Image: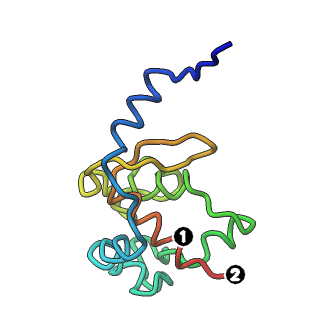
Amino acid sequence: MKSFILISLPALALLAACASSDMPEASEGERLFADNCTACHDYRGTGSAQLIGGQAAPDLTRISARNGGTFPTAQVLSQIDGYGRGKVSAEVMPEFGVLLQGDLVPIEIDGTLTPTPRPLAALLAYLESIQVP
């Protein structure tokens, strides 16, 4: 008896969209961070700037520590891309969606490979690389 592996059309489309792109390294994200994030979050990501309304930019080196030791991939992607506004207004955290367009790479979010623009994936890799206990 022959066995067949069934792959859905959306899964094939995801694989095709991401197949040609190598995963970005943290160093690629570090360059994007230096160009777009250091004014508020400092070059080390420690968040020393005072922002509108007296808020301080958060320490990005302790994202995992604030989340029980787990890096919250979906939450971080949403915050950077502008979809996770929640308690942070657009005046405080700018929306980088337009700056983060590019080839798609697969990022695992809650067990599902999700096509993600390469610059956004690079920033994610960098932020994950600078986490401290």
Disc 1 residue type (three-letter) = Glu
- Report which residue position mark 1 lands on: 128
Determine whether, in the image, residue 15 is placed left or right of residue 39: right
Marking on residue 108: none
Give the residue at mark 2: 133
- Residue 14 point in image, percent of width and height: 41, 35
Classify residue 67 by image quadrant.
Answer: bottom right
**Residue at left 43%, top 73%?**
26
Decide if residue 44 is on the left or right side of residue 39. Answer: right
**Rendered location of residue 56, percent (x, y):** 49, 77
Contact between labelled residues 2 and 1, with CB atoms less than 8 Å apart: no
In the image, 40 versus 35, the foreground residue is 35
SS at mark 2 in the image: loop
Q: Residue at x 38, y 63 (%)?
A: 24
The image shows residue 112, relative to residue 29, as above or below, that is: above
**Residue 39 shown left or right of residue 51 in the figure:** left
In this view, 1 is above or below 97: above
Q: Earlier in the sequence, mark 1 or mark 2?
A: 1
Q: Residues within 10 Å of mark 1 (few under 14, many from 20)?
A: many
Q: Residue at x 39, y 86 (%)?
A: 43
Q: Nearer the viewer, residue 109 or 43?
A: 109
The residue lying at 47 percent from left, 42 percent from top is 114
Q: Looking at the figure, which quarter contains the C terminus?
A: bottom right
Side (left or right) of 58 relative to 91: right
Residue 37 lies, in percent from the top left, at 35, 74
